[in-house]
Image: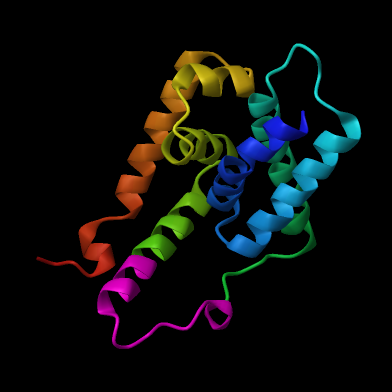
Amino acid sequence: MNNTIENILPMLRRFAYSLTGNAADADDLVQITLEKILKKGVPDEVDVNKWAFKVCRNVWIDEYRARKVRQNAVLKPELQEPQSVNEQQAFDSKEMLAQVNVAMNTLPDEQRAILSLVAVQGMSYKEVASSMEIPVGTVMSRLSRARCALLDMIKPERLGADA
């Protein structure tokens, strides 16, 4: 079991990052996920990969809701990494990533999780449906709504690209 978990750590961390939007929270989420998996184990008939993503998603939802109840957390620009003035392209990339993160955070939990599993992790619709225990049609519908919502939120004119 440990070898399998070690093999999925990079994918699990990317998934956690896509849910949380920052590396520190992603690392915390992965750690909590691994603690739960190691403490409670993986059911015999379940694929470890699917189980890890499901546990990670559920932990994130629990943490997200708890945080939301405790405080109305706002993105604080002073906590972001400082930008180099000489690296305009790097700044633009980070700005785009920040826009995508903000847009992702406005999506409903179900849409964000499915978009992350498909777009970031490269999972098939069938794999996502299986890991989330929902029909493939629901995955397709939520993914479509998530993509449309992101496109509406991230328009070229909103990013300053008027050309």
Q: Quadrant of residue 96?
A: bottom left
User: Residue 83: where, in percent of width, then height?
Assistant: 41, 82
Residue 65 appears anywhere in the view: no
Drawn side of residue 66 relative to residue 107, left or right? right
Question: Is 41 left, or right, of 57 in this rendering?
Answer: right
What residue appears at the point 71 percent right and 33 percent down from the top-left corner?
3
Give the magenta-colored segment's residue range: 77-95
Residue 162, image x and y in percent?
Answer: 14, 67
Can you give x and y, in whole percent of width and height, for residue 62 in the image? 76, 44
Judge whether residue 17 is colored magenta.
Answer: no
Residue 90: within the magenta? yes
Q: Is residue 110 above or below residue 63?
A: above
* 79 up-or-down from 19: above or below: below
> As rendered, which of 14 and 21 lies closer to the eye?
14
Q: Picture quarter containing residue 4?
A: top right
Above or below 11: residue 138 = above
Q: Which quadrant holds the N terminus?
A: top right
Q: Position of residue 154 (x, y in %)?
A: 31, 55
* Location of residue 28 (image quadrant): bottom right
Residue lying at 57% horizontally and 52% vertically, measured from the top left: 17
